[in-house]
Amino acid sequence: MERQMLRYTLDRLRGKNYLLECHREVDPIYELGGVLTYFRNRQPILFNRVKGSSMKVVGGLYGNRDIVYELLNMNRENRLFKFMDAIANPKPYKVLPTGPVKENIIRGNIDLSKIFPIPKFNERDSSTYITAGVLVVKDPESGRFFTSIRRMQVLGGNKISDLIGSPKLTNDFLKLEKRNRDLEVAIVLGYDAYFLLACQVSSATYGVDKFEIDSAMRGEPLELVKCESVDLLVPAYAEVVLEGRMVAGKRELEGPFGELMGYYGGIGPHPYIEVDVITHRNNPIFQVAFPCREEHLANGLIREVELYNHLKNQVDVVDVNVTEGGGYRFNAFVSINKKFEGDGKSAILAALGSNKDLKQVVVVDPDVDIYHVQDIEWAITTRCQAASDFVIVPSA
């Protein structure tokens, strides 16, 4: 019995009555995304009938903190330490001779838009986008596997643009490009919370094989299979894998695209991927994420680990919350046990120095619930004076 990836996750969600199933036909252009955003992307929904496709679509899987904690078999109190332990003590993965993701293999004549019900979410988006795809690459020097979520604009046929983002991935691609070599990639859809969380750990910071972090976090080896056309490994129980190459020396315009914080990203030239092979399970379920709530919650959970570690060397930190309202990136609430005068300001400065993206930090005593904005507002209103308790760093 399988215990990994999407179908096992759906069984668990059904068992806890967390999964909604939509039996009414929905249009992947705007309507499907509209349903997800109506529920603020916190409600797992399986769309059983999608216009123009026989394929089911699932979204909203990993946008609710409490559900994610349950799927990871952890809770708010121990999650930081479990994440830290997995990063510090990676475990080996397991390679299988084959797996369900190999049940169907498509070679050649690939038209992604005809095969998959790829949504368009916002009016001014330049195209349909794959928003939940986890990109798999292999470090050319160490042989370690690195994974990350990237947004992918459908360009037509077998071509999708890739917003690289990651400094390490960018550097690896540019090094190969100078030698006129393509970067081999695989794109995974239909994964579980462990796979998602592991892919958010910074390759540049830790340099650890993401599959080994996944194995440590889930408490058993991540089961993988070899790709058909590239020298990469992918989860044996994934729903869909796109195998291909990031093409050297070529660029396509990408954007605009409706971003997490409610603004459109700009237009720019980016590398693109040519998909050579698709493997998928029988009756595959296509995974989507409304831009980009689920990815950023997972990213915020890992950022909390880094923030906590940075703060604990300065103050007696109780807990940290990299907030939804700040895109799980720009704002944080911090709870500390104040031991000395000035600890609050020390915590603020330490937090701002921990990550270049962090813009606003609120530091409170342990009796204030950092997961409830009303409690934070109450503390700011009743326990501080702006002239003496606000710290502003000019021109930063």
Image: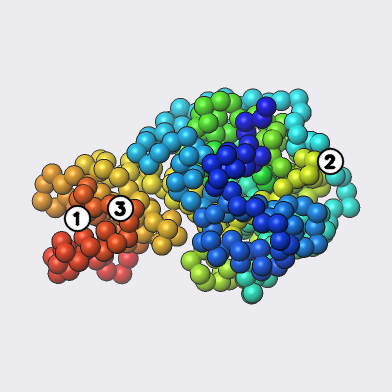
Q: Please determine whether, in this image, residue 356 is positioned above or below residue 204.
A: below
Q: Residue furthest left?
A: 341
Q: Position of residue 344 (x, y in %)?
A: 19, 53
Q: CA distance from mark 1 to mark 3?
A: 17 Å
* Depth check, front residue: 353 or 32: 32
Q: Which mark is residue 105?
A: 2
Q: Position of residue 36 (x, y in %)?
A: 59, 61
Q: Residue furthest right?
A: 109
Q: Which mark is residue 370?
A: 3
* Depth check, front residue: 28 or 253: 28
Q: Position of residue 174 (x, y in %)?
A: 63, 51
Q: Are marks 1 and 3 in contact (CB under 8 Å)?
A: no
Q: Residue at x 71, y 61 (%)?
A: 24
Q: Classify 10 Å Cα crowding around label 3: few (below 14), some (14-19), many (20 and above).
A: many
Of badges 2 and 1, the one in the foreground is: 2
Question: Which image quadrant is residue 59 in?
Answer: bottom right
Identify residue type, mark 3: Ile
Left or right, 331 with respect to 335, comes to right
Sequence order check, earlier mark of 2 and 1: 2
Q: Position of residue 374 (x, y in %)?
A: 29, 62
Name the residue that disc number 1 marks. 345
* Depth check, front residue: 275 or 27: 27
Q: CA distance from mark 2 to mark 1?
A: 58 Å
Q: Classify 10 Å Cα crowding around label 1: few (below 14), some (14-19), many (20 and above).
A: some
Q: CA distance from mark 2 to mark 3?
A: 48 Å
Left or right, 83 with respect to 259, comes to left
Of badges 1 and 3, the one in the foreground is: 3
Q: Are marks 2 and 1 in contact (CB under 8 Å)?
A: no
